Image: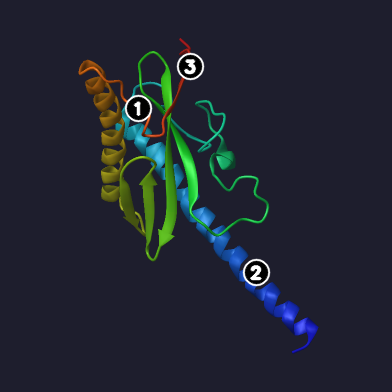
Amino acid sequence: MTENSRFGELADAAERYGSLSLENYAQIRNVAENVSDGFCRYLSAGKGRCVYLVPPEGAWAPQPFQSGAFSVSGTGFLPLEPIRFGLAVRVSRSGDWLRLVLSCSKSGPAMEITIEGGRHFSLAFPIQEAELQELFRQLHRHLIDFFEDHSNHFQHGAYGQRSMGFDFTHVEEEE
């Protein structure tokens, strides 16, 4: 085997990897955008946006981050791995938001979605509206459980722990 053919073999493997990592990112981003848009509609929170895609860690605000909302943002060579993203969800009438972090990975013909600190869900490709609605029910239940569990702990003499991975922020609503 000549040096040229060894490099060619390496370049072919890297190109295949790169192509698949781009496909992985595109599929996960599509799912994330569907979840963000659909969950806001599911919540029917009235005027304005109630869910945004935000980074899964670090500084965030309830605003669109586009590609910056994904854990692979700024990594250079796009890794072929599960990808995390955050959902900023408005949780009060007075402008309180929290960040919910999800992790997505392709598993055969399905997209596996894990809510950090919570439930796991699987969406088959092509994604059906009924499956999305079930995912929205799970996300909603996860958020309700967080608030109810912590409220119940407090009422019974023990503060709840921030075990569901939420970060809170407050934004004054514009009239």
**Residue for point 26% across, 35% down:** 141
User: What amino acid type is highlighted by mark number 2?
Assistant: Glu
Q: Position of residue 153 (x, y in %)?
A: 24, 22
SS under mark 1: loop
Q: Nearer the viewer, residue 52 or 165?
A: 165
Q: Which residue is mark 1?
A: 161
Give whichever of discs 2 and 1 has the lower sequence position: 2
Q: Position of residue 78 (x, y in %)?
A: 62, 55
Q: Which residue is mark 2?
A: 15
Find the residue positioned furthest to the bottom.
1
**Residue for point 35% across, 18% down:** 92
Q: Nearer the viewer, mark 3 or mark 1?
A: 1
Q: Nearer the viewer, mark 2 or mark 1?
A: 1
SS under mark 2: helix
Find the residue positioned furthest to the front.
157
Q: Quadrant of residue 15?
A: bottom right
Give whichever of discs 3 and 1 has the lower sequence position: 1
Point out which mark residue 145 bears. none
User: What amino acid type is highlighted by mark number 3?
Assistant: Val
SS under mark 3: loop
Mark 2: give few (<14), some (14-19) or many (20+) Cα within 10 Å.
few
Q: Quadrant of residue 144?
A: top left
Q: Which residue is mark 3?
A: 171
Q: CA distance from mark 2 to mark 1?
A: 45 Å
Find the residue positioned furthest to the right.
3
Q: Position of residue 10 (x, y in %)?
A: 69, 75
Give whichever of discs 3 and 2 has the lower sequence position: 2
Relative vertical location of residue 79 with respect to residue 51 in this rendering, above or below: below
